[in-house]
Image: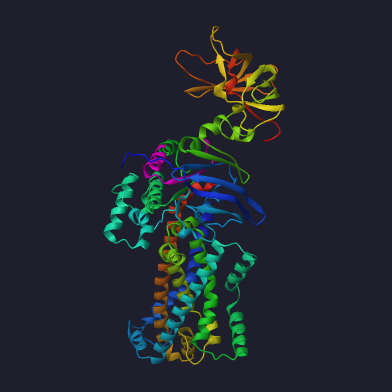
């Protein structure tokens, strides 16, 4: 394995243009458009039934769009069957052929290329090396563990040198430790081979840790496409914000003086100067929802601790997670309690329920969202 | 409590005796050196078996029966593949009622099927031959084929087929390289059960046979001649052996289907969480 990592180009390898898919009465995809770059690790993230798997199957060619079009590497895919597309798929069930051994599974697609026995064996061995399954050639499919099946499925797809590799929840059936290990390996593998990966997942952590860019999908539509950092820190709506991690919501009012100068009336939190960047979607003066992540709020343990903004409240509940402690804090004058996460550093105690606490925060960690939109 | 258990045991054993005692008479008289089928037994002999080899008419009907059994088991298995694949893979209008209709011959009295088919063939003006028997047997064997193959197809992960297509294989190649090997145990079971059913089916064969008879029809004809009875016993014994072998094979392959299914079930555990 070479450790030279490949980076993405600016060329679009997959272009989705107003893709609509109906299954009878059900609208699975409702006008999806996106452009995916060559060499990119792109993920489709959303809850069950949001259409992400359908979108992946449309790209693979197992389903045809009702409306709109898909092009791969500049070629229209309308009417092109799955077996003629430059894509390969890693299935959620891995779909390892149970009657074939590892070597036969991995070399399955090469058979039609008539490479000859020597070349086929060479390529299979090379792939097995890449996925850390060297010398597993003759292992029958039923003797493989979940993680090994996944590697075989990866090798079987990558050996075809696809322009795009599609992965349908590839880690969902693995246990937690293996899943975390595979996240790192999958990311590394993608950088090594330089092939565009499109990953479908409902696990936000998986999407955030692995992808270059993530598309968040709800109800058959993409609501935001951005880098993981941007989606996390600047979600476009309340729904995206609460799907990706935890977000505290506070009601507020936007007072716009000019384009440069905007004041946010955050009620009990006071008046704050904010900038355009804190508004993922441009907003006019009026009622808004303010979002702030639990780790952006700080409990001020010591008397002398000071922050730009401070409010005081009372600890309702605490949950100890080892590295972190999550507090639910009631602040007088706020409709809902705040969730605050604190790192457990040396010498820092865990506050008791009912203890009073000072909460500090900074103006720039606020996100301003449309109040009426979900 | 104990007494109760004992009476149950007695019931179970007498039931088994009632069921299989007549069958046990077959080998006894097949080896008995007397033309009269009654006790006490005479000496042991193989002559009835030796005599079978002399009967040209018997050999002819055996050949006919094998031809009919092989043809109808293959035909019903092919039809079974089509029906069960359609039921496992596609959703279409009236799917459930169509499948129930296909299974229906299982519950119809064979004499009704026989008479009905005879009337249809007469109306069509088709001459009775081994082919009409094959037609009738295919009708009664197909429900069994569908039932067996249904489980073979239903237990196959559909993504295996998609994976094959995805790796560049054609639809026909996918059938040959993935579907066929995976349903092979079911396929063999279906062929065996079809063969067994057709081989000893009498009523339909009796109605639809032309000048060439099948083995059960031949045996029925022989019963008119008391002297031929021991020979029929010997033949019956051989058929019993064949049936036992075929049923054991069938059972073996049926278990193979379940075994492969169990393995797949483990793999597909993740599917429970599929979005």
**In the orientation shown, which residue stands out farthest toward the right?**
A286
Which segment did they paint magenta?
A: A184-204
Q: Quadrant of the N terminus of chain A?
A: top left
Position of residue B100 measured from the top left corner of the image (x, y, whole percent): 61, 68
Can residue B22 be seen at all in this image of the molecule? no
Q: Nearer the viewer, residue A364 or B62?
A: A364
What residue appears at the point 60 percent right and 67 percent down from the top-left corner? B99
Does any portion of residue B118 appear in the rendered image? yes
Classify A284 as above or below B129: above
Return the x and y of residue B61 as percentages of the image width and height. 43, 87
- The image quadrant that residue B234 belongs to is bottom left
Q: How is the image coloured?
A: rainbow
> Does the segment drawn in magenta span residue B31?
no
Position of B65 relative to A311 (above/below): below
| Residue A202 among magenta residues | yes
In the rendered image, residue A294, in percent from the top left (x then y), is placed at 57, 24
Residue B19 x %, y %: 49, 71
Image: A259 above or below B106: above
Q: Vertically, is A233 above or below A192?
A: above
Location of residue A275 (image quadrant): top right
């Amino acid at each position: 394995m070479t450790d030279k990592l490949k980076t993405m180009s600016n060329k679009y390898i997959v272009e989705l243009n107003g893709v609509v898919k109906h299954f009878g009465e059900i609208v699975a995809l409702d006008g999806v458009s996106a452009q995916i770059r060559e060499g990119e690790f792109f993920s489709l993230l959303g809850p069950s039934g949001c259409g992400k798997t359908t979108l992946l199957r449309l790209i693979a060619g197992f389903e045809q769009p009702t409306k709109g079009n898909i092009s791969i590497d500049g070629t229209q895919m309308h009417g092109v069957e799955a077996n003629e597309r430059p894509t390969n798929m890693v299935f959620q069930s891995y779909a390892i052929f149970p009657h074939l051994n590892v070597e036969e599974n991995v070399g399955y697609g090469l058979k039609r290329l008539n490479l000859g026995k020597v070349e086929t064996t060479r390529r299979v061995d090379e792939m097995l090396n890449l996925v850390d399954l060297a010398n597993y050639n003759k292992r029958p499919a039923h003797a493989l563990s979940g993680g090994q099946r996944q590697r075989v499925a990866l090798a079987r797809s990558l050996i075809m040198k696809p322009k795009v590799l599609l992965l349908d929840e590839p880690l969902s059936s693995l246990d937690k430790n293996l899943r975390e290990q595979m996240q790192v390996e999958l990311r590394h593998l993608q950088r090594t081979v330089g092939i565009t990966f499109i990953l479908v997942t409902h696990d936000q952590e998986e999407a955030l840790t692995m992808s270059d860019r993530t598309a968040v999908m709800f109800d058959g539509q993409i609501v935001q496409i951005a880098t993981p950092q941007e989606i996390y820190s600047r979600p476009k709506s309340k729904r995206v914000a609460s799907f990706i991690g935890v977000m505290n919501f506070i009601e507020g009012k936007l007072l716009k003086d000019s384009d440069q100068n905007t004041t946010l009336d955050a009620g009990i939190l006071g008046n704050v100067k904010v900038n355009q960047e804190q508004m993922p979607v441009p907003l006019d003066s009026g009622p808004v929802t303010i979002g702030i992540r639990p780790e952006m709020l700080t409990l001020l343990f010591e008397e002398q601790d000071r922050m730009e903004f401070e409010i005081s409240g009372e600890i309702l509940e605490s949950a100890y997670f080892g590295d972190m402690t999550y507090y639910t804090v009631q602040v007088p004058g706020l409709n809902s309690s705040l969730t605050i996460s604190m790192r457990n550093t040396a010498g820092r105690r865990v506050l008791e329920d009912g203890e009073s606490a000072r909460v500090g925060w900074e103006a720039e960690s606020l996100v301003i969202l449309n109040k009426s939109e979900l | 409590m104990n007494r109760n258990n004992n009476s149950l045991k007695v019931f179970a054993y007498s039931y088994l005796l009632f069921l299989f005692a007549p069958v046990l008479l077959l080998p006894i008289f097949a080896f008995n050196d007397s033309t009269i089928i009654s006790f006490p037994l005479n000496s042991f002999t193989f002559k009835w078996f030796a005599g079978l080899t002399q009967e040209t008419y018997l050999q002819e009907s055996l050949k006919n029966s094998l031809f009919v059994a092989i043809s109808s088991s293959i035909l019903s298995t092919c039809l079974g593949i089509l029906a069960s694949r359609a039921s496992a893979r596609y959703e279409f209008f009236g799917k459930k009622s169509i499948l129930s209709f296909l299974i229906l011959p299982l519950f119809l009295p064979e004499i009704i099927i026989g008479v009905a088919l005879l009337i249809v063939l007469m109306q069509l003006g088709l001459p009775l031959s081994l082919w009409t028997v094959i037609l009738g047997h295919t009708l009664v064997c197909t429900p069994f084929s569908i039932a067996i193959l249904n489980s073979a197809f239903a237990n196959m992960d559909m993504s295996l087929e998609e994976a094959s297509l995805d790796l560049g294989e054609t639809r026909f190649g996918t059938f040959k390289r993935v579907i066929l090997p995976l349903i092979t145990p079911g396929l063999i079971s279906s062929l065996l059960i079809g063969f067994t059913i057709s081989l000893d089916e009498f009523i339909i064969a009796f109605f639809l046979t032309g000048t060439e008879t099948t083995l059960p029809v031949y045996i029925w004809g022989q019963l008119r001649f008391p002297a031929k009875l021991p020979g029929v016993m010997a033949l019956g014994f051989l058929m019993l052996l064949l049936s036992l072998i075929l049923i054991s094979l069938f059972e073996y392959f049926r278990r193979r289907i379940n075994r492969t299914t169990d393995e797949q079930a483990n793999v597909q555990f993740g599917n429970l969480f599929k979005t």
